[in-house]
Image: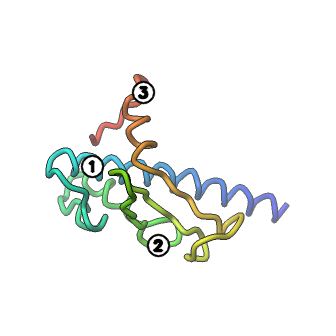
Amino acid sequence: LASKREALRVIGRKVLALFEMKVLGTLVVNHRKDKGSWPEKLSALKPKGETVQDKATARCFDDSWNREYLLKLLPNDNFAIVCYGADGIEGGEDANADFVITERDVRGERNNDEYEYRGS
């Protein structure tokens, strides 16, 4: 029973991480659209306002283990947002598995008719 609960915790953390990473990816794409370049770091996009939306968005910048997500700029005008899992290092399995989304994942979801992120 304990191992099943831990497996469910890992799945929950991954779902949360993927949602937060898509929010961050949307901010990165919007920055590119507005400024003409990718941001150097994700922390530059963190809202500092006191509205409910700003506070909710600001909570998306840290993963389930209280570490910042990593922005990697890739060739061919692409980027990746990475979460290194529980151990905080590249590679691993289960709770230590890395989660990654790319610019194409974010744009693909934004172009979906059913997608509605109120913050973009």
Q: Residue at left 41%, top 70%?
A: 68
- Percent position (x, y) of residue 9? 67, 59
Q: Which mark, residue 66?
A: 2
Tell me the crowding category of disc 3: few under 14, some 14 to 19, or many 20 or more residues within 10 angstroms, Cα based: few
**Which residue corresponds to mark 1?**
53
Q: Nearer the viewer, mark 3 or mark 2?
A: 3
Disc 2 and disc 1: Cα gap in Å? Answer: 20 Å
Closer-to-camera residue (6/106): 106
Q: Is residue 59 above or below residue 29?
A: below
Tell me the crowding category of disc 1: few under 14, some 14 to 19, or many 20 or more residues within 10 angstroms, Cα based: few
Residue most extreme to the right: 1
Residue most extreme to the left: 35
Left or right of 29? Residue 93 is right
At label 2, which amino acid type do we have? Asn
Q: Which mark, residue 112?
A: 3
Q: Residue at left 28%, top 57%?
A: 55
Q: Quadrant of the C terminus?
A: top left
